[in-house]
Image (cartoon, rainbow, N blue to C red):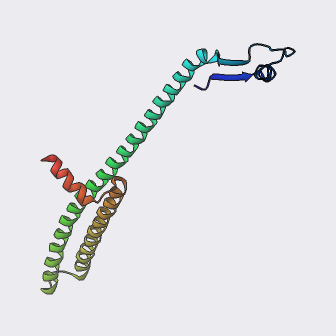
Amino acid sequence: MNEVQFGFNINEVSLSNVLQPSPDNLVLYPLYQLTAGVSLGSFTTNKKKREIEEVDVLISDMEANQHKMKIRAETLARYRKLLLSIETLKIRTNAEEDTRNVYQISQQRFKNADLEMEDMLRASESFNNAQEKRMAAETEIQLAIIELEEIIGIKWESAKRAGERFKK
């Protein structure tokens, strides 16, 4: 549409002589001209322009797909980090229970004078370290949930419920 041109021209001198006829007036024909023109370049370049635009659209689609894949990979990585944090918490909770049992037994043995002070302090330190590691694992879970919620855009509980409904 940009390559098509229209024109209109009026011969004002001849038109005025027709409107006011006189034997001495010279009337030149045509009184008006209507022209239309098309650029010949449009026939040769439009096909190439269209092909270039089609390639640009394909490139845009590929870039969008690549962006989707990056987001998907990041989401899966954050989800795996959450799963790892949950499993780590389970292990550290079991380790804390074990060290709690050892600590309680050590306390009883210490009260009965069957255990030296150094062994009692080691059991206490081990129990405290286990508690600290469990709390760190709980924090890792919370941070992993926050990172996952950031990328998926909804609360983790909502995503979990939706996943359970999807499985059913």
In this rendering, the answer to whether 87 lies above or below 167 is below
Which is nearer the eye, 154 or 100? 154
Which residue appears at 46% of the width and 29% of the height? Answer: 58
In this rendering, the answer to whether 122 lies above or below 138 is below
Query: For residue 119, which quarter of the picture?
Result: bottom left
- In the picture, the quarter occupied by the N terminus is top right
In this rendering, the answer to whether 152 lies above or below 119 is above
Which is nearer the eye, 1 or 140? 1
In this rendering, the answer to whether 153 lies above or below 19 is below
Which residue appears at 30% of the width and 60% of the height? Answer: 145
Q: Is residue 99 left or right of residue 21?
A: left
Q: Position of residue 128 (x, y in %)?
A: 27, 75
Which is nearer the eye, 101 or 83? 83
Q: Position of residue 157 (x, y in %)?
A: 23, 60
Can residue 38 be seen at all in this image of the molecule? no
Q: Is residue 142 left or right of residue 46?
A: left
Count of marks, rendered view: 0
Q: Position of residue 35 (x, y in %)?
A: 67, 18
Q: Position of residue 96 (x, y in %)?
A: 20, 69
Query: For residue 148, which quarter of the picture?
Result: bottom left
Which is nearer the eye, 6 or 167? 6
Q: Is residue 118 left or right of residue 43?
A: left
Which residue appears at 32% of the width and 59% of the height? Answer: 144
Q: Residue furthest right?
A: 24
Can residue 91 be seen at all in this image of the molecule? yes
